[in-house]
Image: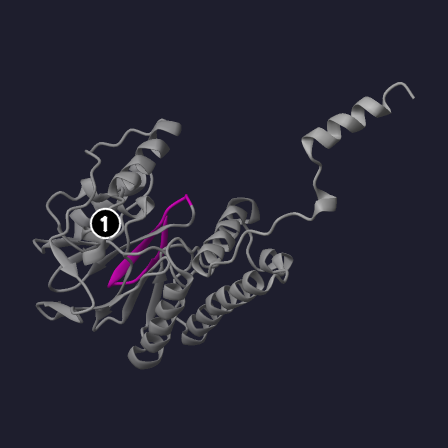
Amino acid sequence: MIQFKNRHFSVFESALFRTNSVVVETNDLILVVDPTWLPHEVTAIRNHVDAIKNGRPVYLLFTHSDYDHILGFGAFPEAYTIASQAFKDNSDREEQLRAIRKFDQEYYVRRPYKMCYPRVDIAVDDQTDFITIGDTRLSFWMAPGHNGDGVFTLIEPLGIWIAGDYLSNEEFPFIYHSAEDYLKTLDKAESIIKNRQPKYLIPGHGDVSTDTSEMFSRLQESRDYIVRLREAVTTGQRFPDEELWERYDFRMGQEEFHKKNIELIRKEYGIPTPVAPESDRVEPESRAVELRTGSGV
C-alpha cells in the first residue's frame, strides 16, 4: 500500500514487517530505494516507476544488504545502482541470497526475474560526501551498526532522509554488527537532524516522520535502549523487558531479536554467558539416582 505520497516521492509499505520502499522523482532522475517484498508489491513499484519516469534515468539505492532490502533488484535491470563500498565488498552475499531462496521456498513464492546479489555501479564510502546528478544532490554518511554496510542518504534540496533500518517507531535497534558502531551511527543521525534539518525521515520499517521533535525522540529511544541493555549485560543487572514490550507491539515477532542483541553485546564486550546456579541445575546422574531410590518406598 502507499503509506505516504506527495508530488516528490511515494512510500510503498509492504504487508510484511511494515517494510518501506521509496520512489523519489526529481527533474533529473527517478530514485528507487530498497524495492521489496512480495512479487505483486515489487511489480506495483515497477509499474509506478514506468508510469512516471518520462525519459528520466532510474537509479536504485540500497540502504544495506539485508535480504529483505535487496530482493527487488532484478525487477530494475536498466537502473544504475548506488550502495556503500562495504555493500559491494560484502563477503556474506551468498548468505543473503540463501535467505531469499529460503523465504521463497517456504512460502511458495515465484518471482518473474532472476535472483542475484545487486551489482553496484556507484559505490560510496567515508570519502564520498555526496554525488550530484543534475541539480539533485545525494549526501551520504556511512551507517554501520545494524549491519556492517549501511548508509544514510539525504536527498537535496528536497530534504528527504533515507535512514535504512534505523529510527523506526515500530522496532527497537536490531543489532547484527556492533553496538558501539550503532551508537556512533546514532551520533551521526543526531548531527543530521541538528545540522541538515531534514523535512522527512523515512525508516526501513514503520512510519515516515515529518516532525523534528519526533525524529529526536526516536533517536533518544534507540540510544537509551542500547545504553541500558549494555549496562544490564555488563553489570549483570536485569533489563526491564516488560517496559520494552509496553512500548513495542510485536513481542512474539521481535523477542528473539532482543535476545540476540544481548548475546551480541556479551560477545562484543567479552562478557561470559551466565551459568545457572547449582540449585537450579539437575545433573543427569543425580536425577537417575533420585528416581531409583525413590521408587517403591
Closer-to-camera residue (40/176):
176
Decide: is 162 above or below 33: below
The single residue placed furthest to the bottom in the displayed view is 195
**Is residue 107 in sight in this rendering?**
no
Q: Which residue: 19% across, 41% down? A: 75
Considering the numbered disc 1 on the image, is that residue within a helix, a strand or a loop? Answer: loop
- The quarter of the rendered structure image containing the C terminus is top right
Q: Position of residue 61 (x, y in %)?
A: 21, 55
Decide: is 115 above or below 256: above
Decide: is 156 above or below 149: below
Q: Position of residue 241 (x, y in %)?
A: 61, 57
Pointer 1: what residue? Answer: 90
In the figure, is residue 175 to the left or right of 229?
Answer: left
Q: How many marks?
A: 1
In the figure, is residue 95 to the left or right of 216?
Answer: left
Q: Position of residue 171 (x, y in %)?
A: 47, 56
Q: Is residue 10 magenta?
A: yes
Q: Is residue 120 magenta?
A: no
**Is residue 118 in sight in this rendering?**
yes
Q: Which residue: 59% across, 52% down? A: 274
Q: Position of residue 27 (x, y in %)?
A: 12, 64
Location of residue 212 (image quadrant): bottom left
Decide: is 176 above or below 291: below
Label 1: how many residues lie within 10 Å, few (<14), some (14-19) or many (20+)? some
The single residue placed furthest to the right in the displayed view is 297
> What amino acid type should be assigned to the residue bearing mark 1?
Asn
Q: Which residues are magenta?
A: 1-16
In the figure, is residue 182 to the left or right of 75?
Answer: right
Q: Which residue: 31% across, 81% down? A: 195
